[in-house]
Image: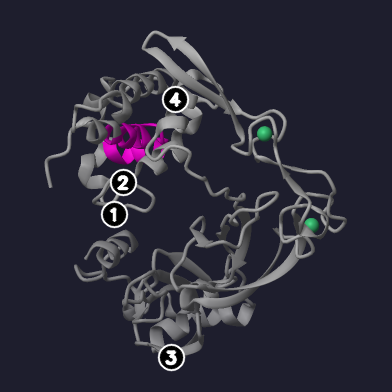
């Protein structure tokens, strides 16, 4: 693959370019390199796509930040970032950036009317549906299958989606002859161009429904409650978005459904705190247990586990329960549970308790003698997370 050019260089802008100037720069480049305007230049399409790709990245704050930090390497394989080996298709460019040119501007018409095949039938796509889904720690850790109830627009069964009574009486719009667009020739700085705009009679649909379907009032779609089964992989995290294809809304009067987007929310667990793929449990023990040693039950993601406290366990010790953490998203590993030992100092003492402790106050074994191996809490944390 050829070396990629710098996105800023392609559009001739600097890093602090405003959104407005970026759009202007892109528009200029797109017009300059449009393949239909450069029939003798075989590199025009490549340059045109290059400009579109640069604009796609620099116009998206997240992608731009990633690009600024890592360059082209940061875009490869990134979710939603970069294009595949073939680059964006002309179709992609028009559907993504149509707003830059505007439907009603001469350029909008120029691009839409002449971009590629000409007169191509566009498949209309409905809107995406976005819902939030709350998961508890166990569901996050192991993955889960859920059935989600959503209200979505689906194709009307009565009319088959065209909005007419019995699905028949649809007439071709006479204003636009069914193309959905009206055209006129416009003089621009670049010469004559054909400007197309959305047909006002049929709103671009090319068809007119004279006898409306009773079930959907001519909309061609109805609101329906669906139960959609979804599989949540293990290891998801707050804010991650999963997409279920074609389970969003169908557009009015025919087309394909948008997607159902599921945004994950993590419910806080009463006992366990998540730290990446590890979970942390704060264990409190009294100092007799810490001094003499004992075995205690601790909560884990999958129920209880028993752990042994060695005699002489210090406050701040971290015990690791291997593999008791959260599964790696799209991976094979699994985090650990870290049990953080806190030795509890009594806050109130009876006369009798106090008398017993007073006897021990000056006992030689009760005098602190930390050695080099008794690291402080912060050193221990460092060892665990960076060791
Ligand atoms: Zn209908
Ligand atoms: Zn029309």
Seen in the image, is 118 located left or right of residue 369?
A: right
Query: Which corner quadrant of the figure contains ligand 1?
Result: bottom right
Circle 2 packing at 10 Å, graded few (<14), some (14-19), many (20+), is many
Q: Which of marks 1 and 2 is nearer the N terminus?
A: 1
- The residue labelled by disc 1 is 77
Task: Name the residue at 41% across, 42% down.
Answer: 91
Q: Does the magenta stretch include residue 61?
A: yes
Residue holding disc 4: 110
Q: Do the residues labelled 1 and 2 touch (CB within 8 Å)?
A: yes
**Distance in Å between CA atoms under marks 3 and 2:** 56 Å
327 lies left or right of 269? left
Kindly identify which residue carries mark 3: 294
Q: Residue at x 31, y 41 (%)?
A: 66
Q: Which residue lies furthest to the left in this view?
A: 2
For label 4, count other residues whose C-alpha is less than 10 Å away and answer few (under 14), some (14-19) or many (20+).
Answer: many
Magenta span? 49-67
Quarter of the image where one finds residue 173: top right
């Amino acid at each position: 693959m050829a070396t990629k050019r710098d996105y800023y260089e392609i559009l001739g802008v600097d890093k602090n370019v405003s959104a407005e100037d970026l759009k202007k720069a892109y528009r200029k480049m797109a017009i300059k390199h449009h393949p239909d305007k450069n029939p003798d230049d075989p590199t025009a399409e490549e340059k045109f796509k290059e400009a579109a790709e640069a604009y796609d990245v620099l116009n998206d704050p997240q992608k731009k930040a990633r690009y600024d930090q890592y360059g082209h390497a940061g875009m490869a394989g990134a979710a939603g970032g970069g294009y595949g080996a073939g680059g964006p298709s002309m179709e992609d460019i028009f559907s993504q950036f149509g707003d830059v040119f505007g439907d009603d501007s001469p350029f909008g018409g120029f691009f839409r009317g002449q971009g590629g095949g000409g007169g191509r039938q566009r498949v209309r796509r409905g809107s995406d549906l976005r819902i939030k889904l709350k998961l508890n720690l166990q569901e996050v850790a192991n993955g889960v299958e859920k059935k989600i109830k959503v209200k979505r627009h689906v194709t009307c069964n009565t009319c088959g989606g065209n909005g007419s009574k019995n699905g028949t009486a649809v007439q071709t719009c006479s204003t636009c002859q069914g193309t959905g667009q009206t055209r006129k020739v416009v003089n621009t700085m670049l010469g004559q161009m054909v400007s197309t705009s959305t047909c006002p009679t049929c709103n671009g649909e090319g068809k007119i429904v004279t006898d409306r379907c009773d079930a959907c009032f001519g909309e061609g779609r109805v609101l329906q409650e669906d139960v959609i089964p979804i599989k949540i992989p293990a290891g998801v995290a707050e804010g991650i978005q999963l997409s279920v294809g074609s389970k969003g809304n169908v557009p009015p009067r025919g087309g394909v459904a948008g997607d159902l987007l599921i945004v994950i929310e993590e419910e806080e667990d009463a006992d366990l705190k998540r730290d990446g793929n590890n979970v942390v449990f704060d264990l409190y023990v009294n100092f007799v247990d810490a001094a003499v040693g004992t075995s205690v039950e601790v909560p884990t993601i999958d129920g209880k586990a028993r752990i042994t406290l060695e005699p002489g366990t210090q406050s701040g010790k971290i015990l690791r329960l291997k593999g008791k953490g959260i599964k790696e998203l799209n991976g094979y590993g699994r985090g650990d549970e870290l049990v953080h030992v806190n030795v509890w100092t009594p806050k109130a003492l009876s006369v009798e308790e106090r008398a017993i402790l007073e006897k021990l106050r000056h006992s030689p074994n009760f005098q602190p003698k930390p050695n080099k191996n008794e690291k402080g809490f912060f050193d221990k944390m460092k060892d665990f997370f960076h060791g």
